Image (tube, rainbow, N blue to C red):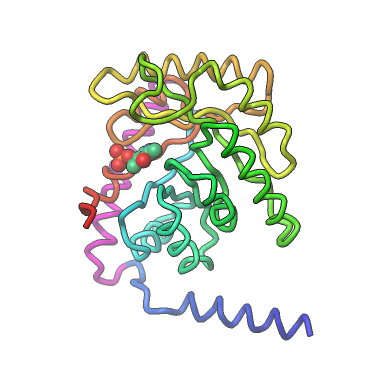
Amino acid sequence: MNDQVNGQVNDQVNDHVTEPEPATGQADPRLEQLRGRLAAVRRRIDGAVAAAGRQERPPRLIVVTKFHPAEDVRRLALLGITDVGENRDQEAAEKAAALGALGLHWHFIGQLQSNKAKSVVKYAHAVHSVDRLQLAGALAKAMAAEQERTGRAPLECFIQVSLDDDAGGRRGGALPSDVPALAEQLAGSAGLRLAGVMAVAPFGSDPAPAFEKLAALSARLTADHPGATGISAGMSQDLEQAIRFGATHLRIGSDILGPRPALG
Ligand SMILES: *Cc1c(COP(=O)(O)O)cnc(C)c1O
């Protein structure tokens, strides 16, 4: 019985892999465009890593594929990308379902409503935008059910903090003073792993001081939670500064995929 079930699953996986798919070397201008842009971003990352003397612990590249079609995610996988980021649950769930056979790590990086937790834990390896206790509780509850069902690994959780000077910054995130309580709750939830901190640099000002502040918050967090060393920071415009201040996870979208199609 089990063999039969496994056989069916494998057949489906194989069907998936043999779908028409541009092989390297065949004419697929978009693949070549992505290859070139990815190489350029990798050169920038390598330069910043070398400048910061971080060759021993380079950051992980998450390619943010929001608004771009699943076919682009497939191309990125062909180019060796293993981690992709999305910020809307429905779009992410559809892409993850379509591309399940590729074994990618899906990172949820956008504002998340608690009632979407159940859906997100079905495909996400990590959530970078945990910014309040209620959401942490909803993710813990959803993961308890999901782990019972599938035995999956714990969900990696980053605490998103606001780096705006005024409270309740426009780019989202918890206040720095809220981090310890959130960290306690995440660290104490069986299905969750406290991974570290995340932030988006404030609009229109030098990102360096913001990332420096994030590094200080990270140091404070790891004093209490030594395993929570993650720093998710750095986008297309500011990846060099983020690397300089210790980013472990870069979230790069437009410099690899091009401008995002406007919302219809
Ligand atoms: C869209 C997005 C990114 C990627 O930004 P780019 O400027 O396109 O590189 C990174 N992080 C978050 C939270 C995002 O929403």
Between 105 and 56, which is closer to the camera in this rendering? 105
The percent coordinates of residue 155 (x first, y second) are 63, 45
Q: Give the position of the N terminus as an image quadrant.
A: bottom right
The percent coordinates of residue 52 (x first, y second) are 42, 20
Q: Is residue 41 visible?
A: no
Q: Which residues are magenta?
A: 25-54
Please determine whether, in this image, residue 122 is positioned above or below residue 225.
Answer: below
Horizontal side, residue 191 vs residue 240: left or right: right
Q: Is residue 154 visible?
A: yes
Whether residue 45 appears in magenta in the rendering, the answer is yes
Q: Which residue appears at 71% of the width and 82% of the height?
A: 5
Please determine whether, in this image, residue 222 is positioned above or below residue 159.
Answer: above
Q: How many marks?
A: 0
Whether residue 103 appears in magenta in the rendering, the answer is no
Q: Which residue appears at 63% of the width and 23% of the height?
A: 181
**Quadrant location of ligand 1?**
top left
Q: Which residue appears at 40% of the width and 59% of the height?
A: 91
Q: Main secondary structure of the magenta part?
A: helix
Task: Specify the quadrant of the image occupied by residue 159.
Answer: top right
Please determine whether, in this image, residue 141 is positioned above or below residue 72.
Answer: above
Between 20 and 185, which is closer to the camera in this rendering? 185
The percent coordinates of residue 13 (x first, y second) are 56, 76
Horizontal side, residue 231 vs residue 33: left or right: right
